[in-house]
Amino acid sequence: MTIATDFFDLNAAPMRIGAVRLKVRDLDAVSTFYRAVLGLSPIARGEHRITLGTGGTPLLELVGDPSLAPLDPRQAGLFHTAFLMPSRSDLARWVAYVAAARVPLQGASDHTVSGALYLADPEGNGIEVYADRPVSRWHGESGEIRMGTKALDIQDLLESAEGTEWSRFPEGGGVGHVHLQVGDTSDADRFYRDVLGLDIAARDPGASFYGSGGYHHQLAGNVWNSRRAGKRPARMAGLDAVEVMVRDSGDLAAIAARAESAGIASIKDTGALTLHDPWGTTINLTN
């Protein structure tokens, strides 16, 4: 029997996620959670903000403001930030750790392309922690990416921990994708596919999954909780910005041209472009 080892290299994709920025009401409580539960390390601190990551790579920026309105789960914004483990063994070690620490989980799913577990931070921001399966297991007979949802076999996952314990978020891991709540998937398609240039890798009822370079998705948008939502209130806690790293400067220029053609305002800088999606989320594209 041949064992597939062809795992996707996100660093080779034309576009990938860098860091996510959240606005939070209690900076100490939320930052403590991400350090204790996910094992992220402080990388930079400023007045009312902290950047967390691994191996010196920023993954999450938290900006604190106690005067913000609490997150409304019906608003457009974040469905979850998905933290990708480098291997299934890393995911297994994390699962064993959170089980021992009695961290509440909200679900565990086998998505065919990956195995994933779900939880939320103290202010309700969704989190996915996952590990990809080999690319050869992603596709159907016609070459399409097959994503489904069934129960994850936790016991089978735990057996891959290889007898070692979780200590911190591993170097080589990162934010694999960001799943958004949007008001309308057609509007999301026009922005994320037609302007940013991502492919629609898969669809679910009420959701589009946007991929780059053949990945199952770097971004996604669904209306499951937020159908017909408008722009998110500026003074509400929750998602503020997503960094999208663009490998080719020519692609960045093409995105800028498409945004201009679509009448979408942008801020241009050397090697960087800032746009806002239809619901007010800042998309920082960097080269």
Image (tube, helix red, strand yellow):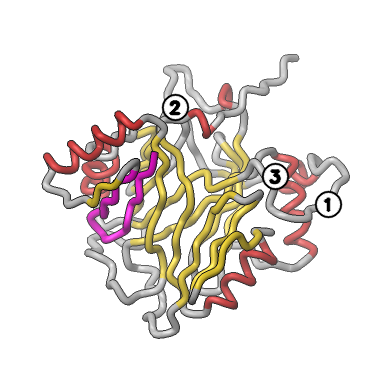
Helix, strand or loop status at disc 1: loop
The residue under the point 46% across, 70% down is 63
Helix, strand or loop status at disc 2: loop
Measuring from the top left, give residue 121's x and y in whole percent.
Answer: 56, 68
- Give the distance between the C-alpha atoms of the residues marked 1 and 3, in whole angstroms: 20 Å
Q: Is residue 60 left or right of residue 274?
A: right
Question: In the picture, which quadrant includes the N terminus?
Answer: top right
- Give the distance between the C-alpha atoms of the residues marked 3 and 2, in whole angstroms: 26 Å
Q: Is residue 260 above or below residue 47?
A: above
- Residue 153's tag is 3
Question: In the picture, which quadrant includes the C terminus?
Answer: top left
The residue under the point 29% across, 51% down is 274
- Numbered range of the magenta stretch: 272-287
Does residue 74 show up? yes
Dot 1 amino acid type: Glu
Residue furthest out toward the bottom: 67
The residue under the point 25% across, 34% down is 253
Instruction: Say few, some or many: other residues with alpha carbon within 10 Å of mark 2 (under 14 / 14 to 19 / 20 or more).
Output: some
Assess whether residue 66 is covered by the magenta stretch. no
Does residue 109 show up? no
Look at mark 1 in the image and give the residue it sits on.
165
Residue furthest out toward the right: 163
Q: Is residue 272 left or right of residue 84?
A: left
Measuring from the top left, give residue 259's x and y in whole percent.
Answer: 19, 42
Choose mark 1 or mark 3, whichever is in front: 1
Look at mark 2 in the image and give the residue it sits on.
214
Residue furthest out toward the top: 1
Instruction: Say few, some or many: other residues with alpha carbon within 10 Å of mark 3 (under 14 / 14 to 19 / 20 or more).
Output: few
Sequence order check, earlier mark of 1 and 2:
1
Dot 2 amino acid type: Gly
Q: Which SS does the magenta portion mostly show?
A: strand
